[in-house]
């Protein structure tokens, strides 16, 4: 008899767990209370990148004159933009549903609750299995004084559904979501202001990327405040936004993008820590035998690609395979602005605290062949090296979220700087800036 596996949630971690489990011969049931695909497909990665692609087109039209093309932007029809976005979402949903069907996964619609005996109840029906994977994802964090209605005061969910371009928007939080929304709506003509309580935009990323992000926002005519918090938001359409420095801003829309928190299903299992996350070890196993938790719910790395890998580790581990734990992997991160920003490994600030001796080099995109042939002037590739080992890579250029895998591969597999330099990079490409930065070391 096949081992039975129940998966709760159909986001990246959930559907990957279900498909892989079925491929390994398990009898898999997946439970989903909403749309197939979870946050990534329906309220995150896919719709935001669809809107960012529209913003790229708008920006290309604006820059076309300097390349000898006489063109102008006639109108942005947000209703048609939303239809374009919705097509991307539906395509993603259909693809995931087909994977589940082809793998033979049973899908049950409804909200799951987990009993003390590891049984799962849905709509009055009770299910039991040998193994359980919880992958219920995360939701936006809001501020206690905000009355979020997803019409005037928004989270990342509501802002992706706007059918009219607001004249003005205040974005609370200058992390990757805030930056990407600033990219979209400033391109559409909205007067955007970012308010970030930390001392720089993109806090937590390398300081060179934070500095470039601030310069990028200036070029896009986005006003930003750092080291400043929002104390209150009064009224709607427009709202009066009160800052900690005493200033008051007026905005048609207010977006709260101050982070995300795990969505914990109703459960009688003792697996939740004091911060509201599910406790897991490096193989994503909870303190309860046979119960695993993957993706945003464990708070280890709240990125879709981390959820994919965690799902793979969890399912293979429960199948008895000897697999590397999640902490053994280098996880790249990207911000889909223009230029794109990408990072993997240690920041320079991390390296200062960990090593007495390290080297760093930063190569400008303006000196790169692809850069000056396309007119790109903003951007760089920064490498951080200890001995002959690459320990950090930070990039700002078109395609950075793809090229970052070159450094991720080197770090994950211990490929030396000397061997990386020995590789022939195609010319002219932005990837050559990575090569040149390594040569500068």
Image (tube, grey):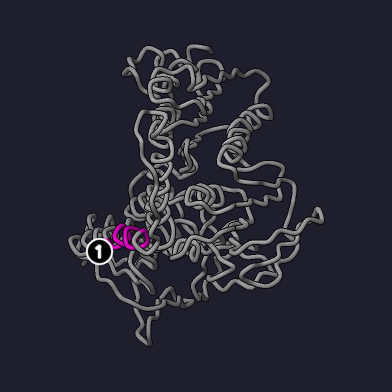
207 or 172, which is in the foreground? 172
Q: Is residue 339 above or below residue 291?
A: above
- What range of the chain is rendered magenta? 81-90
Image coordinates for residue 222, horizontal then vertical, percent: 60, 45
Q: Is residue 57 above or below residue 251?
A: above
Mark 1 Cα shell of 10 Å, populated few (<14), some (14-19), many (≥20): some
Q: How many marks?
A: 1
Position of residue 143 in the picture relative to residue 383 (left or right): right
* Residue at far front of view: 70
Residue 358 sits inside the magenta stretch = no
Image coordinates for residue 280, horizontal then vertical, percent: 51, 56
Q: Residue at x 59, y 33 (%)?
A: 212
* Residue at far right of view: 246
Q: Main secondary structure of the magenta part?
A: helix
Q: Is residue 289 visible?
A: no
Q: Say which quadrant the N terminus sits in.
A: bottom left
The residue pinned by badge 1 equals 97
57 or 315, which is in the foreground? 57
Q: Is residue 198 visible?
A: yes
Q: Residue at x 53, y 23 (%)?
A: 383
248 or 128, which is in the foreground? 248
**Residue 404 sits in quarter:** top left
Q: Say which quadrant the C terminus sits in.
A: top right
* Residue at far left of view: 102
Position of residue 20 in the picture relative to residue 352 (left or right): left
Q: Is residue 114 above or below residue 161?
A: below
**Residue 407 sits in quarter:** top left
Q: Residue at x 39, y 74 (%)?
A: 33
* Residue at far bottom of view: 124
């Amino acid at each position: 008899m096949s081992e039975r596996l129940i998966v709760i949630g159909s986001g990246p971690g959930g559907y990957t767990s279900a498909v892989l489990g079925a491929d390994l011969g398990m009898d898999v049931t997946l439970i989903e209370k909403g749309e197939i695909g979870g946050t990534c497909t329906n309220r995150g990665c896919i719709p935001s990148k669809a809107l960012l692609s529209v913003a790229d087109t708008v920006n290309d039209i604006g820059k076309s004159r300097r390349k000898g093309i006489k063109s102008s932007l006639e109108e942005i029809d947000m209703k048609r933009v939303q239809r374009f976005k919705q097509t991307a979402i539906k395509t993603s949903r259909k693809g995931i549903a087909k994977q589940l069907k082809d793998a033979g996964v049973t899908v049950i619609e409804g909200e799951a609750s987990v009993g003390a005996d590891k049984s799962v109840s849905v709509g009055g029906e009770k299910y039991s299995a040998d193994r359980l994977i919880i992958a219920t994802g995360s939701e936006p964090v809001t501020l206690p004084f905000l009355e979020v209605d997803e019409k005037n005061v928004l989270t990342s969910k509501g802002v992706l559904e706007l059918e009219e371009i607001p004249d003005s928007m205040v974005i609370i939080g200058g992390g990757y979501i805030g930056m990407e929304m600033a990219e979209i709506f400033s391109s559409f003509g909205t007067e955007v202001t970012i308010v970030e309580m930390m001392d720089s935009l993109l806090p937590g990323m390398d300081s060179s990327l934070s500095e470039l992000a601030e310069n990028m926002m200036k070029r896009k005519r986005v006003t930003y405040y750092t080291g400043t918090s929002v104390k209150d938001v009064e009224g709607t359409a427009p709202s009066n936004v009160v800052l900690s420095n005493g200033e008051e801003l007026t905005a048609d829309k207010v977006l709260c993008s101050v982070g995300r928190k795990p969505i914990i299903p109703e459960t009688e299992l003792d697996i939740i820590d004091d911060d509201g996350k599910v406790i897991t070890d490096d193989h994503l196993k909870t303190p309860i035998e046979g119960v695993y938790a993957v993706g945003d719910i464990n708070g280890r790395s709240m990125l879709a690609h981390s959820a994919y890998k965690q799902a793979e580790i969890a399912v293979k581990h429960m199948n008895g395979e000897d697999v590397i734990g999640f902490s053994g992997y280098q996880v790249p991160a990207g911000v889909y602005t223009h230029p794109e920003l990408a990072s993997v490994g240690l920041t320079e600030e991390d390296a200062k605290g960990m090593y007495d001796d390290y080297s760093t080099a930063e190569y400008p995109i303006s000196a790169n062949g692809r850069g000056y042939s396309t007119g790109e002037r903003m951007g760089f590739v920064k490498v951080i090296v200890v001995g002959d080992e690459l320990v950090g890579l930070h990039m700002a250029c078109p395609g950075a979220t793809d090229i970052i895998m070159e450094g991720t591969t080197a770090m994950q597999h211990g490929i030396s700087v000397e061997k990386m330099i020995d590789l022939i990079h195609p010319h002219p490409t932005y990837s050559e800036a990575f090569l040149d930065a390594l040569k500068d070391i």
